[in-house]
Amino acid sequence: MMLKTLLASSLVALVATLSTVSAGVPGQTGALISANEYCIFLPPKYGGDIAASEDFAIAFCNKAIATAPKAKTLPTGFIKSVHLVRNTQKGWVQITGRIDGSKYGLSKKDGGGQYDIKAPKGASYAGYKYFVQLIEPDSNIYCLRVCKEKADCPTHRSTYGCKGVLGAGDYS
């Protein structure tokens, strides 16, 4: 009987934890599940400036994802390539690739910017405590890493661009 009670209590605690992790803030929670299921943050309005929207950007996903409530759908053709790397030992996942900023009205003169756990306000990625994402419309590249540990998602180099923050990656 005691074992049954202990198991029931553990199950209730696990469900509560999973609900908290996946619930998130509507429109402010992204997901990175695979190269076929992912979200990135973008300005809330078509043609918005990346850096100017750092405090209020919203999640856009390539399709509806339950753990990213009220995220918008990425414009068709915006993401041109997705290269996924998973570091299971350190507990991080990242995607890098190319974008076509014209599909969302981004200026080719926009040097881009960084979204992370500090901005947009309330932003997060389901199942991860930290994230760092950069969008560079002038170079047509993007990068995103979600992490269990803060040290694996460096947020203190926002002006360095994708390659300076996350390393070489695959931007083809």
Image (spheres, rainbow, N blue to C red):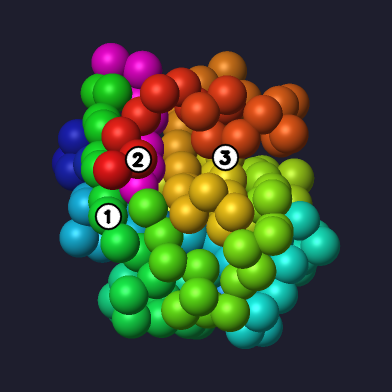
The reply to whether the C-beta atoms of the residues labelled 2 and 3 are less than 8 Å apart is no
Q: Nearer the viewer, residue 56 or 166?
A: 166
Which residue appears at 41% of the width and 81% of the height? 75
Residue tagged 1: 81
Residue tagged 3: 132
Q: Amino acid at mark 3?
A: Val
Which residue appears at 19% of the width and 43% of the height? 4
Residue range of the region highlighted in magenta in the rendering: 89-97
Residue ranking furthest to the front: 109
Which residue appears at 61% of the width and 63% of the height? 108
The residue tagged with tag 2: helix, strand or loop?
loop
Q: Nearer the viewer, residue 83 or 117?
A: 83
Residue 148: percent from left, percent from top: 46, 29
Q: How packed is label 2: few (under 14 Cα within 10 Å), some, or many (20 or more)?
A: some
Q: Is residue 51 shown left or right of residue 108? A: right
Q: Is residue 74 magenta?
A: no
Residue 136: percent from left, percent from top: 58, 50
The reply to whether the C-beta atoms of the residues labelled 1 and 2 are less than 8 Å apart is yes
- Give the distance between the C-alpha atoms of the residues marked 2 and 3, in whole angstroms: 17 Å
